[in-house]
Structures are given as C-alpha cells and as structure tokens.
C-alpha cells in the first residue's frame, strides 16, 4: 500500500503567525490602523494557526501543537479583546468588558511567561526556530514593560524586535515550503 505524503501544518501556522505579527507591528509603529490586524488576527493568525496546531497534534508534534493552538488562541483573544473591550456601545452595555491598561499588561505578562517556556524548548530544534521564539519572548517582554510603565520608547523597540520575529517566522515557513521543491534553506543547529 502506497503511503500518502501529508503536508506540514507548520507552513500555514508560521505564515499566519508571521503575517499577523507583521501587521500588528505596522500598527504599533503607527503605519496602519487596527482593521487589518483584527481581521487577520481572527482568521489567519487565529483560526488558521489554531487549525494548524490541531494538525500538528495529529502528526504527534507536541511543540507545534502547543505553539500553534496557543498563539492561534492568542490572536483570536487579542482581536476579541480589542473589538469588545474598546467599543463604547458594548462597554456601555457590558462594563466588565472595558479594556484597561493593567489588564493588557497582565495579559501580555502571561504570554511572556508562556513564550519563555516555549523558547527553552525551541532551542532543542534548530537555530531558526530559536530565533523566532527569542525575538517573540523579547517582544512580549518589551510590550509588557511598555504597558506597565507607559514607555513609548520600549513599545517602539518591542515593535521593531517583533518585525524581526515576523520575518524569522516567514523564513522558517519558506524553509518548510521550499524543502518540498528541492531548495534547502539553512536553519542552523540546535542551541541546546
């Protein structure tokens, strides 16, 4: 019986993560509004990445399962948080949904901690994945500090770091896609 070759769900997960991270940083740097970020956060960075995570589960990749399902949920939660927590009409009817700076700071702190754990695991895979998670960890840390302190400078530094994270995720996505075409992009050795 012939074995059916399956696609690698990480290609879609990394693409959705990279694109949504890129657009959010374009917003954080003041280049675009929130509209594209919210819609992409719901569908590509959110839903598509979430589905990719469950496909990683199916192939037995616990790291990819945890990462893609979690960050897919992050994007959907962030988009919903921004839509419902900032809408004057909704907040008037449901004041508990009001978005406040301390809530955003603690939301980001929780993701910083999770990302730190995932960064440790990523160092066992390859250098490219470790760079994605290192820049993501530093970006979350910067955004968390920005929300707790109100420092626009730290927020700008975090946005530039997260642009590097987005491009690193796209590079890793390209590595996966190109490998099927006989093009081998280097990903570097594991750091641990």
Image (spheres, grey):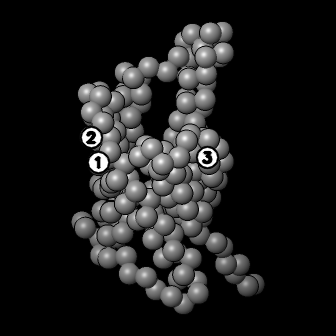
> x, y percentage for residue 32?
53, 46
Q: Is residue 117 left or right of residue 171?
A: left
Q: Is residue 73 left or right of residue 162?
A: right
Q: CA distance from mark 2 to mark 3?
A: 24 Å
x 66%, y 73%: residue: 6
Q: Quadrant of the C terminus?
A: bottom left
Q: Quadrant of the N terminus?
A: bottom right
Q: Is residue 6 visible?
A: yes
Precedes in sequence: disc 1 or disc 3? 3
Q: Is residue 80 above or below residue 154?
A: above
Q: Residues within 10 Å of mark 2 (few under 14, many from 20)?
A: few
Instruction: Give the labeled residue for mark 1.
Output: 157
Q: Which mark is residue 153?
A: 2
Precedes in sequence: disc 2 or disc 3? 3
> x, y percentage for residue 81?
55, 29
Dot 3 lies on which element?
helix
Dot 1 lies on which element?
helix
Q: CA distance from mark 1 to mark 3?
A: 22 Å
Q: Which mark is residue 36?
A: 3
x 26%, y 40%: residue: 153
x 56%, y 40%: residue: 34
Circle 2/circle 3 CB separation < 8 Å: no
> x, y percentage for residue 43?
66, 48
Dot 2 lies on which element?
helix
Q: Is residue 53 visible?
A: no
Circle 2/circle 1 CB separation < 8 Å: yes
Q: Is residue 126 left or right of residue 28?
A: left
């Amino acid at each position: 019986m012939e074995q059916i070759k399956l696609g690698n769900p990480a290609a879609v997960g990394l693409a959705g993560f990279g694109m949504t991270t890129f657009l959010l940083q374009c917003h954080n740097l003041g280049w675009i509004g929130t509209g594209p970020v919210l819609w992409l956060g719901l569908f590509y960075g959110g839903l598509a990445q979430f589905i990719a995570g469950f496909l990683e589960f199916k192939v037995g990749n616990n790291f990819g399962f945890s990462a893609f399902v979690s960050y897919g949920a992050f994007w959907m939660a962030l988009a919903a948080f921004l839509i419902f927590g900032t809408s004057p009409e909704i907040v008037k009817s449901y004041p508990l949904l009001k978005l406040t700076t301390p809530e955003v700071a603690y939301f980001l702190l929780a993701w910083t901690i999770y990302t730190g754990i995932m960064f440790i695991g990523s160092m066992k895979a390859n250098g490219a994945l470790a760079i994605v998670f290192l820049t993501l960890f530093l970006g979350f840390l910067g955004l968390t500090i920005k929300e707790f302190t109100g420092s626009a400078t730290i927020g700008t530094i975090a946005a530039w770091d997260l642009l590097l994270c987005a491009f690193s995720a796209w590079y890793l996505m390209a590595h996966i896609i190109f490998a099927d075409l006989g093009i081998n992009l280097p990903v570097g050795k594991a750091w641990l």
